[in-house]
Image (spheres, rainbow, N blue to C red):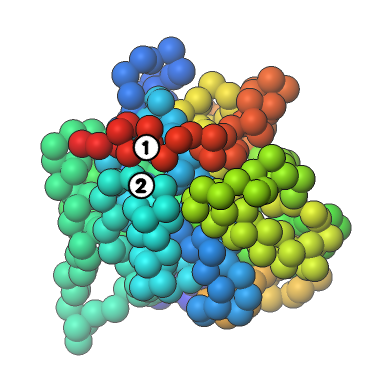
């Protein structure tokens, strides 16, 4: 990303679709006062319950909790779930998604196969000529869905699929009313948990080119930042009311969360979990619950010096090459970052909602998601 050639590629790439998509302003964003259900496409690297894959150990659990939370939210209408690589490979994630959402929770929501790998960076060519972008099943379904009606795209993993849609099918992408994503940082911000550093900006690290395409698309985009998403920890004891419940969904969720917290506790010394991606769901449903400000996004190469606050973090596929910097933009713009709740009661309501879907009778869930 730091080579002059790569910089040139980025400029020429963005020149095309910014004009096509056009510029829309925050005025287009919905508020909690709107009563119609918000129609949402979810892009996720759902790996809840998976062990192993490209990373050893237990995969992050929050995507599964997020999708269940979204399906349970009366203010959201979930059109479908596109599964992308990220926490694990796409194949195991698809199996995990079908098991959790269809078999255990009884939902009938469509589950589509998304990207298996990040976008080529810099862009690959065929002897110097541009290559057509490959449209996978999930991206084609997103385009078809957007042709029918405007949607919000909730990105809980790497931004590969929505970036492909924006680049290859700009007319469909122009019908996205808002992209909501997890990622980005203030200038110089490092991601520390309990005094330990080393966390990458995972979704950006796995596909920095996709993050840059989204951030520069001209589509209203909201990033939920680390300052906000790390501010809530759900203690392991929150599972206690559900222990002993024989329902297969509850049993599975409790086992998966316990396994994740065991691993997290060893590394970060916290006996609980951060509901990272669940913030995006809550924002989609209750945007007024958050304090958000306009930002100017830029992808900036990170430092190779591990002592530098701007150092590249991560290992293996999530090794950072650049950071998505979200700088204050007093003049406004189409990109914003949420860094706090709007009130203590909004924070409490979010914490209360994190596991609320487990109280729902599976038969009722099936009835509500039918059709
Ligand atoms: Ca995720």
Q: Residue drawn 60% across and 46% down?
A: 245
Q: Earlier in the sequence, mark 2 or mark 1?
A: 2
Q: Nearer the viewer, residue 214 or 225?
A: 225
Residue receiving disc 1:
363
Q: CA distance from mark 2 to mark 1?
A: 8 Å
Instruction: State the image coordinates of residue 318 (x, y, percent, origin top left).
Output: 56, 72
Q: Is residue 118 above or below residue 344?
A: below
Asked which quadrant contains residue 28, the reply is: top left
Seen at 14% across and 40% down, the residue is 147
Query: Is 278 located above or below residue 73 in the figure?
Result: below
What element does badge 2 sit on? loop
Vertical comparison of 126 with 174: above or below = below
Q: Residue at x 48, y 34 (%)?
A: 360
Q: Which residue is mark 2?
A: 106
Residue at the image point whose x is 60% and y is 38% from the top: 354
Q: Are marks 2 and 1 in contact (CB under 8 Å)?
A: yes
Disc 1, SS: helix
Bin the neighbour count of mark 2 within 10 Å (Cα to Cα): few under 14, some 14-19, many 20 and up: many
Label 1 packing within 10 angstroms: few (<14), some (14-19), many (20+): few
Residue 322 in view: no
């Amino acid at each position: 990303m730091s080579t002059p050639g790569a910089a040139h590629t980025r400029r020429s790439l963005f020149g095309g679709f910014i004009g096509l998509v056009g510029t829309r302003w925050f005025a287009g964003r919905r508020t909690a006062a709107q009563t119609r259900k918000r129609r949402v496409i979810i892009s996720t690297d759902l790996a809840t319950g998976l062990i192993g894959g490209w990373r050893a150990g237990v995969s992050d659990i929050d995507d599964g909790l997020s999708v269940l939370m979204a399906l349970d939210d009366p203010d959201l209408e979930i059109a479908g779930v596109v599964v992308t690589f990220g926490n694990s490979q796409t194949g195991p994630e698809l199996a995990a998604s079908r098991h959790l959402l269809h078999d255990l929770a009884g939902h009938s929501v469509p589950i589509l196969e998304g990207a298996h790998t990040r976008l080529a960076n810099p862009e690959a060519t065929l002897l110097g000529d541009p290559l057509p972008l490959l449209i996978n099943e999930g991206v084609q379904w997103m385009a078809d869905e957007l042709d029918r009606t405007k949607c919000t795209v909730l990105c809980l993993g790497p931004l590969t699929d929505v970036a492909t849609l924006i680049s290859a099918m700009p007319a469909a992408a122009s019908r996205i009313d808002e992209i909501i994503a997890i990622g980005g940082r203030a200038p110089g911000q490092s991601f520390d948990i309990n005094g330990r550093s080393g966390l990458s900006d995972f979704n950006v690290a796995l596909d920095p080119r996709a993050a840059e395409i989204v951030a520069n698309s001209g589509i209203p985009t909201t990033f939920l930042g680390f300052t906000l998403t790390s501010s809530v920890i759900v203690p392991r004891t929150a599972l206690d009311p559900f222990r002993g419940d024989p329902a297969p969904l509850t049993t599975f969720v409790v086992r998966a969360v316990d396994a994740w917290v065991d691993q997290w506790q060893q590394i970060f010394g916290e006996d609980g979990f951060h509901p990272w991606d669940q913030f995006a769901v809550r924002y989609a449903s209750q945007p007024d619950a958050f304090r958000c400000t306009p930002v100017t996004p830029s992808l900036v190469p990170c430092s190779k010096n591990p002592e530098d606050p701007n150092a590249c973090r991560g290992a293996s596929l999530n090794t950072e090459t650049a950071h998505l910097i979200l700088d204050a933009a007093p003049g406004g713009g189409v990109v914003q970052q949420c860094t706090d709740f709007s009130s203590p009661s909004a924070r409490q309501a979010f914490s209360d909602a994190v596991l609320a879907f487990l109280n729902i009778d599976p038969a009722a869930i099936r009835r509500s998601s039918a059709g």
